[in-house]
Amino acid sequence: MACINNENCKFSSSSSFSKLPLIDSRRFSTVEYDETGDEFPIERVFPVYARGTFTPEPNPVLLEFTISGYDPIWNAIREEAKLEAEKEPILSSFLYASILSHDYLEQALGFVLANRLQNPTLLATQLMDIFCNVMVHDRCIQSSIRLDLQAFKERDPACLSYSSALLHLKGYLALQVYRVAHKLLIQGRELLALALQSRVSEVFGIDIHPAARIGEGILLDHGTGVVIGETAVIGDRVSILHGVTLGGTGKETGDRHPKIGDGALLGACVTILGNIRIGAGAMVAAGSLVLKDVPSHRYAIKMHLKISS
């Protein structure tokens, strides 16, 4: 897993967790694991389209961009914008200002983010300078913004094109502001990083602490209500649906937030609390409250138990 800041995050797993309750019994519900899926067929519980691949594969688009500087994703975005401008002339000025007037993806993304987040004290021109200066000097962020775009295009059926993700999908946009804020935090510009976090929360309804560490190829589907805490770690190719909370229990200090392995899928409104691990390739069903580790390549399903009178 490629973690931010060159820090490797390792996730342990054990086959002894085959039937481990995750939910406090006082909440009258529990989560169970099932390896075979015979009792709870996985396609009936999870949006499998959103699941990222666990095993990393060489990315031809990224390799091409890294080796030669040729950027097929940016070229595709420009072609999509030209076609959309022809089909919907009323949006032609918007598409020109947001995409066609720019020379490269980082510049266009900086423009879009600056105009979405501007307010009387954070001017669009200042924000665009901040975003562009960080993105054009950081190869890791350049890689991440492209792999995230591919994740949205490939794993979100509602994402019709690269340009639609760049212009309209707040999960993608909030994720890229996080990446810039994270870099600013590393540089010691903590107040500015926290100001960006606050502004993203106001505009997009997504709250990602800039100190969290998030990998590449992330799908933040819808994004509304997502909260990611300060010491959370998220691996590569992870899919997160709306309403997910990666939080603390309120009883811990220091490293107190969840660690999510590569290729995991967190369903809508999942709440994961404490410094626990969701293993690589694991999936957690919508509405689950997770308080203990989930082993790799298992899925956790919320079960409603009858309450005796």
Image (cartoon, helix red, strand yellow):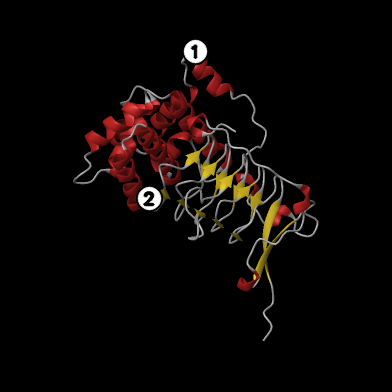
Q: Position of residue 88 (x, y in %)?
A: 36, 39
Q: Is residue 25 left or right of residue 191?
A: right
Q: Nearer the viewer, residue 283 or 230?
A: 230
Q: Nearer the viewer, residue 102 or 86?
A: 102
Give the vertical position of 75 relative to 275 (above or below).
Answer: above
Residue 14 visible, this angle: yes
Residue at left offset 65%, top offset 37%:
53
Label 1 crowd (10 A; few <14 / some 14-19 / many >=20): few
Q: In the picture, which quadrant includes the C terminus?
A: bottom right
Give the vertical position of 157 relative to 33 (above or below).
Answer: above
Labelled disc at residue 88: none
Q: Nearer the viewer, residue 258 or 288?
A: 258
Task: Read off the residue under disc 2.
Answer: 204
Using the rendered view, name the quadrant where residue 52 is placed: top right
In the image, farthest residue toward the top: 68
* Kind of residue at disc 1: Ser
Q: In the picture, which quadrant includes the N terminus?
A: top right
In the image, farthest residue toward the bottom: 309
* Kind of residue at disc 2: Phe
Task: Read off the residue under disc 1.
Answer: 68
Q: Is residue 199 left or right of residue 294?
A: left
Using the rendered view, name the quadrant where residue 51 is placed: top right
Residue at left offset 53%, top offset 23%:
62
| Local secondary structure at mark 2 | helix
Q: Position of residue 36 (x, y in %)?
A: 80, 51
